[in-house]
Image (cartoon, coloured by chain):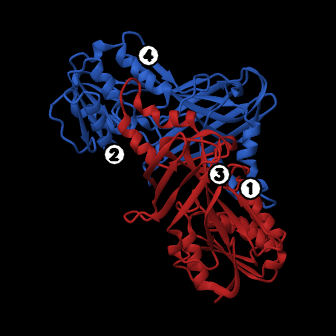
Chain colours: A blue, B red
Amino acid sequence: MLKDVVRTRSYQNVITQNNFLFKDKIVLDVGAGTGILSLFCAKAGAKHVYAIECSQMADMAKEIVKTNGFSEVITVIKGKVEEIELPVPKVDVIISEWMGYFLLFENMLDTVLFARDKWLADDGVVLPDKASLHLTAIEDAEYKEDKIEFWNNVYGFDMSCIKKQAMMEPLVDTVDQNQIVTNCQLLKTMDISKMSSGDASFTVPFKLVAERNDFIHALVAYFNVSFTKCHKLMGFSTGPRSKSTHWKQTVLYLEDVVTICEGETLSGSMTVANNKKNPRDIDITLKYAINGNRCKVSRTQHYKMR
Amino acid sequence: MLKDVVRTRSYQNVITQNNFLFKDKIVLDVGAGTGILSLFCAKAGAKHVYAIECSQMADMAKEIVKTNGFSEVITVIKGKVEEIELPVPKVDVIISEWMGYFLLFENMLDTVLFARDKWLADDGVVLPDKASLHLTAIEDAEYKEDKIEFWNNVYGFDMSCIKKQAMMEPLVDTVDQNQIVTNCQLLKTMDISKMSSGDASFTVPFKLVAERNDFIHALVAYFNVSFTKCHKLMGFSTGPRSKSTHWKQTVLYLEDVVTICEGETLSGSMTVANNKKNPRDIDITLKYAINGNRCKVSRTQHYKMR
């Protein structure tokens, strides 16, 4: 994970270029892993950093903290945020890299919100404090053929029943920006400093306008993250026009091949919710419609990330 | 998995080019997945095929069998081989694609042996019936730097304690054949038709002779699989000189960089055993020594696949 340069450098820049946020402050690092963010914060002058990590990696983090001479400043706590005790009543800063694929898949957002509600001082800061989900549409004839139509003829056998299942699984993959057919639309912004856990379930409308005559095989979702409390706005994007990250993008294949003309609109809505049976799974419902010159379609599709 | 062409085509060729092994025979497909091997067998004239699959995929396999008109010939049984009942006392053929990374990691070999002992007729055949593990040595300066030395300086911090852990984890990756420095040696052959479960734990010696002056950064293990009951010998290799498969190769990094001259020998032994605590994990112990012109080393290293 450390090898995702976009991610780690972004956090590093946020911390090292904004010492005023950390100098003499109490910091809580939620899901600290190797402790890299805690180390950045300690180096930026934090008074004390509590690094919480529930996996075996906590033992490594302790050793790394010691090796690098920060034992006085960083306390690694092995355990679950929901279960551990902090030796201080309040913290000034909560920092975390909690985002999952599609922003919300297997994420640690609830844990960050729990820590915020329990320990963050009234004038405290959550880093990052904004996350947004975006949508665009792509042509993907070749890949859809490989991934989906493949099942029509597998070594001479018809396995098309697997096709339905393959269609329902959002694909985490890197999309070439040349595949983008429409504008990119902001679907949803989340304010981590204020939101509640339930705000991560939502229905939002979209309108995607074609920038050229093309076919649409899939919609593509991605997220941006911002640190608005920095001296100047900082953050990063996981979109197909940005340098790629381990989050890649999330591709939702459409049952229809949509023939769209420049200027025409594919509109609809996306509903995102945790699966009721398995709350770690995410259910996505996509409604889309086009009433175009060469194509009229209206359809609802269900996807499940698991 | 079906997209691993080397694997699936090998099984397809074995079955379609050796109808005599299947014609009017009772076949058991262990870990059938989508049922592809069962379909090949049915098409090759099997009297009946029992396809055992314990995952949800069994439901798909049932539908695929029906769609392709083989419901009369193939019976998909959803369940564990160790727990299900077969409607026949004996089978003539057991076919399975049971191999894991490093041949033995998270494999289904024990299940195949269980099925063999319980159901295979005296003159029955197991396909494949031979599997062999091989070893060679590679230079890998660049990659070792990226994967292992990376931890010496992570965004300015010393995380070398993670290096030790990284070294202990065999890396499943594709090796370029130009990296090969020595001969390739057969370590161990397993006869699936006769072996017992315990034969998958062993200690074997090796002697690797350098084919050029070079450095050795890692040993590389891979496996071959054979179907010796075919009209002519068939099989495939997962070695670095063959077309790559999803199994890739297994790279064991050495603590030393071995400076080896053409004709010199790196000798030692490899011990493979299931971990006692977690039997799904594999412990590998490597002893290696060289008494060369430019390098004298003798060392024991422990690895864990998990």
Q: Are discs 3 and 1 located on one and the same chain?
A: yes
Q: Are marks 1 and 4 on the same chain?
A: no
Chain letter belonging to callout 2? A
The residue that appears at 71% across and 32% down in the rendered structure is A290
Disc 4 vs disc 2: which is toward the camera?
2
Of badges 4 and 3, nearer the viewer stands 3
Q: In the rendered view, does B148 fall on the left or right side of A240?
A: left
Distance between mark 3 and mark 1 Cα atoms: 9 Å
**Mark closest to the chain's N terminus, 4 or 2:** 2
SS for dot 4: strand
Q: Which residue is mark 3?
A: B246
Residue B223 in percent (x, y) is at 64, 59
Q: Give the alpha-carbon distance from disc 2 to disc 3, as whole Å.
A: 29 Å
* Amino acid at dot 3: His
Q: Badge 3: how crowded within 10 Å, few (<14), some, or many (20+)?
A: some
The amino acid at mark 1 is Val
Residue indicated by mark 4: A234
Whether labels 4 and 2 share one chain: yes
Asked whether residue B54 appears in the rendered view, the answer is yes
Q: What numbered label is drawn on residue B6?
A: 1
Of the residues shown, which amino acid type is indicated by label 4? Met
Q: Secondary structure at mark 1?
A: helix
Distance between mark 4 and mark 3 Cα atoms: 40 Å
The foreground one among A184 and B35 is B35
Where is residue A270 shown, x and y percent of the image?
Answer: 56, 36
Does the residue at mark 1 contact the one at mark 2 (Cβ under 8 Å)?
no
Same chain? Circles 4 and 3: no
Q: Choose mark 1 or mark 4, whichever is in front.
A: 1
Give the class, few, some or many, for how many residues have Cα within 10 Å of label 1's Cα (few <14, many ≥20): some
Q: Which mark is residue A55?
A: 2
Quadrant position of residue A65: top left
